[in-house]
Amino acid sequence: MASTEAALSLPWYRSLSGPQWKTLVAANLSWTLDSFEFFALFITVGFALQQLVAPAEHAAIPRYAGYVLAATLFGWGVGGMVGGIIADYIGRKRTMVLTILAYSLTTGLSALSWNWESLAALRFIVGVAIGSEWSTGASIVAELWPDHARGKGAGLMQSGAGLGAILASVVWLMIGGMGPNAWRWMYLIGVLPAFTVVWILRHTPESARWERSNEQRCEARALKRQGAELSGEHAALTRFTLVDLFADRAARWPLIGSLVMMLSLTIGFWGVSTFIPTYVGTVAARANLPAAQWAGYAGLVTGICGTLGYIGLGFLADAIGRKPVTMLFYLMCLILTPVVYLGTWNVDVLLAWVALFGFFTLGIWAWAPVWLPELFPTRMRGTAIAFIFNAPRLIACIGPLIAGTLIVGLGGFGPAATIIGSLFIVGFLVAPFLPETNGRPLPGAV
């Protein structure tokens, strides 16, 4: 108790240990590299399809882009759920290392695409590989960081998504003018993250909470093999974690509510925000400006402001609570979507609106690593947050498909984005019914 009071009397950043900071760096770095990979797709998909689709089909590129994004999203959902389960059984650290190696080795394959079908198929494989990293990083940061700073840690971890977007945009601004094959180089550069594994192995500790939970799982299984009759948490520890997630009554409403929130966010984001670089490039082209360059600018601005949004949500969640700040971000996403896509802005003003749009539409994702780990016990935490974060992608993959089809059918980005973006209201309405967990200890093994 005395040590806890002493920690609370210090500035939050001085109350943290070296291993806690190193864990954040590892989780943030992994998510940054993941983000580089999938944001590279957002930036390049239109340019890739100009080469991979016959000229007569160029007017339908938004539809094909929807197919490619949907394939990536579906693969991400599958891989993400599997990765969360693995993290509950073999540990957070080892799962993080395996996922980095997997997506580093698979992303370069996208550079070999020869038509839009092959690009979609290869992106599915990459999606499977990158999907499981997030839940591992969110779990280990939540389990190692103290209660009073957990929101900040989660927001800082999630900021890796913005940093990856910035990195991808900078790289594209450097190589985007190298000709029609520039997009292939973007995917080859994605192989480099494999070299970070050595640092993570040396400097990142395993979660003590997971280690204790794993010991309890082994003890419970041993008792079951001996014929003992188990009940309560001992019985739960012997169940497969995904079965346990649905069998545990205490987890039922947090599971349902957060799934609905994540579904609305995932469909809305992938059906709206992923088209921003292409949309800005289109507006720039109408003004006789270089489309690739302005698409890069849009990605860069979105990444910078999204990074601030992730961090801002995490700090606000510790200051005023998980519930009010999450509702605020959902509401702003709902309002800003038609402002960006339906406004008749010149490209400079549009870029300013994209900056604000990026702050909220990227920043809103931080509610998940901030809030979700606090809703489920350690024995199923990786499985639970991975399922909630990734299962909606199996349904939300229709978002890019619908958006791409609507863009072509309605003759523009504005009406399509507004229709898809209206789903943000669902998250705003459901959030009040989840329990407020600000400052409370994590449930599960200590």
Image (cartoon, rainbow, N blue to C red):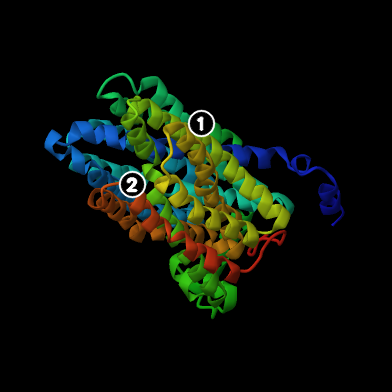
Q: Is residue 446 left or right of residue 422?
A: right
Vertical side of 366 occupied by 225: above or below: below
Residue type, label 1:
Val
Horizontal arrangement in the rendering, residue 300 relative to residue 289 (left or right): right
Packing grade of label 1 (10 A; few <14, some 14-19, many >=20) is few
Q: Secondary structure at mark 1?
A: helix
Residue found at x 31% / y 18%:
178
Q: Position of residue 287 (x, y in %)?
A: 34, 29
Q: Quadrant of residue 188?
A: top left
Q: Position of residue 196 (x, y in %)?
A: 49, 31
Left or right, residue 353 beside residue 232: left
Q: Is residue 155 above or below residue 171?
A: below
How far apart are the two marked residues, 2 and 1, measured between alpha carbons? 44 Å
Q: Give the residue at mark 2.
A: 413
Q: Residue at x 68, y 51 (%)?
A: 316
Secondary element type, mark 2: helix
196 vs 296, nearest the viewer:
296
How far across and down, in percent of the image, does residue 65 sit?
27, 43
